Image: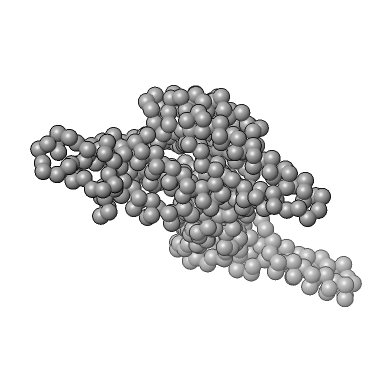
Amino acid sequence: MALSGRAAAVAVAGVLVVLAVRSLVTMAVINGLLLAAILLDMALAAPVRALRVRRGGDTRVRLGEPATVTTVIENTSARPLRAQLRDAWPPSARPSAAQAWLRLPAGGHGKVAVTVAPARHGDCVSERVTIRSFGPLGLAARQRGQRVPCTVRALPPFHSRRYLPGKLAQLRELDGQHRTVRPGQGSEFDSLREYVIGDDVRSIDWRSTARHRDVMVRTWRPERDRRIMLVLDTGRTAAGRVAGYPRLDTAMDAAQLLTALASKAGDRVDLIAADRRIRTRVLAPSRTTVLATVTDALAGLQPELTETDWRLVTATVLAHARRRCLVVALTDLNFAVDLLPELRALAARHELLVGSVADPRLAELADRRGDAASVYAAAAATRATAQRSELAARLARLGATVVDAPPERLPAALADAYLALKGSGRL
């Protein structure tokens, strides 16, 4: 049972009457009438157990976009329903309305639409719907909560999508499909054509030249059907914010761009995310749905405030990728994390591409010399930058390609590194 504000107002009016008359009989009469009215109102209210509730609507939405969830209520009782519906969405879902009013005739049905705009990626879950069925007087209501679970998955935003057309144009140029043909340096033979000034003389096909009047050169195209293994570090360094966003969010944006580009290039994409344990893995997804599958897997990831077990990560990658492939490790170039021994094992077996989010504030701090505090901050920033550069140089000596770029440039820079590796025939 639940009392309404109208019942409270009637009770206050009764108190004023009792104070004015100052009679016990008057108080008893008013209390009796109010209690009788409340009981009668509850008796005439539609029974909440006779209500059938189901939900539908959007189940997936990009972060920053609204989703509409519809709650359908069917009144199977013989009494009209005047109800207040309250949905149990968490505050991070940012629902458009916390409650709604609904009037249904006997045997009728209606629906209530709620718009949610999740504040962070992941699953927004509403487990229960609470319904209050009021009587005709509006003094009291029958109340019951029903478990009607509903989940809206907020997918990570794909801000780097704007780079995709340009990267696809570069890919078509590598494949020899663009009007301005530029032969790639892959290992799959494409075609023969006449020599032009500027061509590499090592590409001359002497046998074909002997059969023709002109000098003929071989053109190559990057190999297809190669395997790309994306490795996301979800440890404590991924929780650090750069330019207002966690490093993990930038890494996920870069992973989506690489997935879209590699799938168009005819390559296979796998995904592993880990810290102290493997958080998620996507292995051998369908090429037609690989971007949707990877994006859906990324949506449930959150950084964990623990050290990443790179020994576990390396063992998992080597167990799943027995043949040589491109391993893209998205992590932080941090001297506090011992990356080198494990990444050395990956670089020995696979082509290794390391992507890291650089903090542009380090350059700003390094240029300040106004006071003693600024000098100390500049020294710390200079030291941090030097350490990152030294670690990147060590990784490069192992044969890895390192991309250390600010958040707004990292996805495009990683895509360029992938195209460069593909064009040079290193995949």
In percent of the image, x 69 and y 45: which residue is there?
381
Number of callouts: 0
- Say which quadrant the N terminus sits in: bottom right
Residue found farthest to the right: 22
Tell me residue 368's x, y (percent).
73, 53
Q: Which residue is farthest bottom? A: 20
Q: Position of residue 230 (x, y in %)?
A: 46, 37
Q: 131 left or right of 290? A: right
Res. 12 visible in picture: yes
For the C terminus, give its image quadrant.
top left
Does 376 sit above or below residue 140? Answer: above
Residues 149 and 157: in front is 157
Q: Position of residue 293 (x, y in %)?
A: 41, 42
What residue is at 60 percent from the left and 38 percent from the top? Answer: 389
Whether residue 190 is situated above or below residue 76 in the rendered picture:
above
Viewer-side residue, 423 vs 270: 423
- Please state which of residues 159 and 215 is positioned toward the viewer in this rendering: 215
Residue at point 55%, 43% (across, down):
404
